[in-house]
Amino acid sequence: MRCEGPSRMQSSLVKRLPTCCLPKAAKKYSPGCTMTDTCLSVLVTRPAAQAESWLRAFQARGWQTLSFPTLDIQPLELSPQAKNRVLNLDQYQGVICISGNAANLGLELLADYWPQWPVQQLWYAVGPATAEVLLEWQLQPEMPRRHDSEGLLGLASLQQVQGRRLLILKGEGGRTTLRDTLLERGALVDELCLYRRTLPEVSTEPLHHWLADTRSRKYIAISSGAGLKNLMQMAAEHLDRLKSVPLVVVSQRLAEFAQSQGFSAINAGGTSEDLLVQAMIKGSSTS
């Protein structure tokens, strides 16, 4: 059950979602807080296409933001085995999307072959951003309250899966907890690997300027371990200063990883904008 190798996706859709995989340059930081300001300054490290909702939520509160994606999303080619899974979409009782990128790329691909979705097929979204993509394609996904693999595995409809065929839309690599646990429960699980995460080729100057500015309280919003690893690499000689900034992360697992790397981390408990905003407000009031 391996992820298939890379190539280029076709796209002949009438309806098209915004592309999530084109490299984006980091936006320049424009500091606006003074020492007397109470606003926060937030570094958002999500890939550009997924960052917009977070940026809007933080900016709506008057906070300064810097969009500095630490992951580029590169589509993978559809291998013969992967294409067979696409053509047999109606043979799966459930389809699980474990990221917004997987939902964007996967639905764009599937719609080329399936102008109408199979009936009586369950769809799952790991979090609200992923669910929003599915809703735009007229699908009604089930979403856990906890936005990770463990949350998905806690859903009632994924408990008794003996003999059911399930398809996971995902990126290359990553955790295997979801697949492994579903297999242990007796499901027949296939994966459709749609993209590869890479280190962005962008100037790190905006990051270094942001770290050097001491005129506002700072937070770094992190949505994945891979993104944090890349951020550490991109910080280079400024790594010690980077580690002095508290992180707000989307899961307890990610918080524990961040802490093992020497960061202070607050677990927002999910990827929604409200959860991140509340975590930052609470962190600021208690520090």
Image: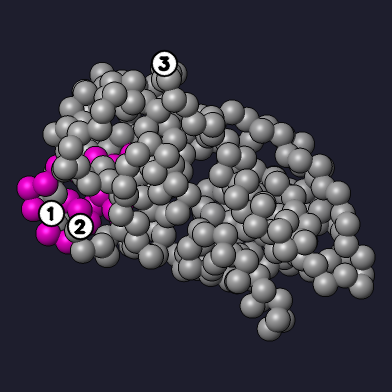
Gap in Å between the C-alphas at discs 1 and 2?
Answer: 6 Å
Judged by depth in the image, the label closer to the viewer, 3 or 2, is 3
- What is the magenta range? 159-183
Q: Secondary structure at mark 1?
A: loop
Q: Residue 271 location in percent, x, y? A: 50, 58
Q: What is the quadrant of the N terminus in the image?
A: top left
Could you tell me which residue is drawn at 82 percent across and 47 percent down? 29
Drawn side of residue 162 relative to residue 154, left or right = left
Magenta includes 176? yes
Could you tell me which residue is drawn at 53 percent across and 30 percent down? 19
Of the pair 52 and 207, the residue shown nearer to us: 52
Q: Residue 184 location in percent, x, y? A: 15, 56
- Residue holding disc 3: 12
Q: What is the quadrant of the C terminus in the image?
A: bottom right
Q: Is residue 175 visible?
A: no
Q: How is the image coloured?
A: one colour
Drawn side of residue 49 relative to residue 179, left or right = right
- Residue holding disc 1: 161
Of the pair 246 and 62, the residue shown nearer to us: 62
Between disc 1 and disc 3, whose residue precedes?
Answer: 3
Could you tell me which residue is drawn at 70 percent across and 81 percent down? 285
Judged by depth in the image, the label closer to the viewer, 1 or 3, is 3
- Residue holding disc 2: 158
Magenta includes 163? yes
Q: Alpha-carbon neighbours of circle 3 within 10 Å: few (<14), some, or many (≥20)?
A: few
Amino acid, disc 3 = Ser
Q: Secondary structure at mark 2?
A: helix
Amino acid, disc 1 = Val
Q: Looking at the image, is 41 positioned above or below residue 3?
A: below
Q: Is residue 221 visible?
A: yes
Q: Residue 196 location in percent, x, y? A: 47, 34
Q: Are marks 1 and 2 in contact (CB under 8 Å)?
A: yes
